Amino acid sequence: MINLIKIEPQNNYTLKLYFSDNSSGILDFTYMVKTQSSLTKPLESLDYFQACFIDFGALCWKNGLELSAESLYRKCKENGTFHINQASA
């Protein structure tokens, strides 16, 4: 089971995500912010977006929005930003 272990906010709505298998990836969440749902609307505030945190290995925001590590891991692989730290693997 893959867990999210660290988050580093980058520019705008982009986060660098670190996973429990010594891999990492960068995801741009602009697409999600633009959906304008009740859970994503607060993310328009960059300060709010970057106040994300990890809870039980998932990416979370204080309004209850939660994204599983597995889905984020898969997105990183699909968009080509996935990297495995060979020195630690």
Image (cartoon, rainbow, N blue to C red):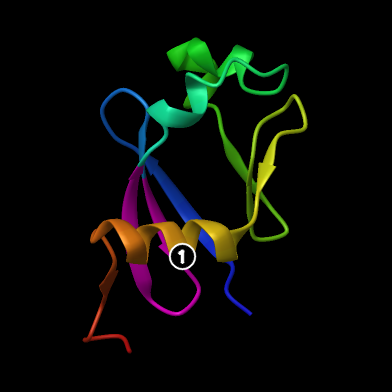
* Magenta stretch encompasses residue 48: no
Q: What amino acid is labelled 1 in the image?
A: Arg
Residue at the limit of the structure toward the right, as seen here: 64
Local crowd size for mark 1, using a 10 Å CA cut-off: few (<14), some (14–19), many (≥20) = few
- Viewport quadrant of the C terminus: bottom left
Region rendered in magenta? 16-27
Tell me where residue 9 sits by quadrant. top left
Kindly identify which residue carries mark 1.
74
* Residue 79 screen position, x and y as percent: 29, 56
Helix, strand or loop at mark 1: helix
Compared to 61, does 66 lie above or below? below
The N terminus: image quadrant: bottom right
> In this image, 34 relative to 77: left or right?
right
User: Residue 45's spot in the image, x, y percent?
Assistant: 49, 10
Majority secondary structure in the magenta region: strand
Residue 16 x/y as whole percent: 34, 48
Which residue: 55% across, 21% down? Answer: 35
In depth, the one of 35 and 61 nearer the eye is 35
Residue drawn at (44%, 15%) of the image: 46
Q: Quadrant of residue 41?
A: top right
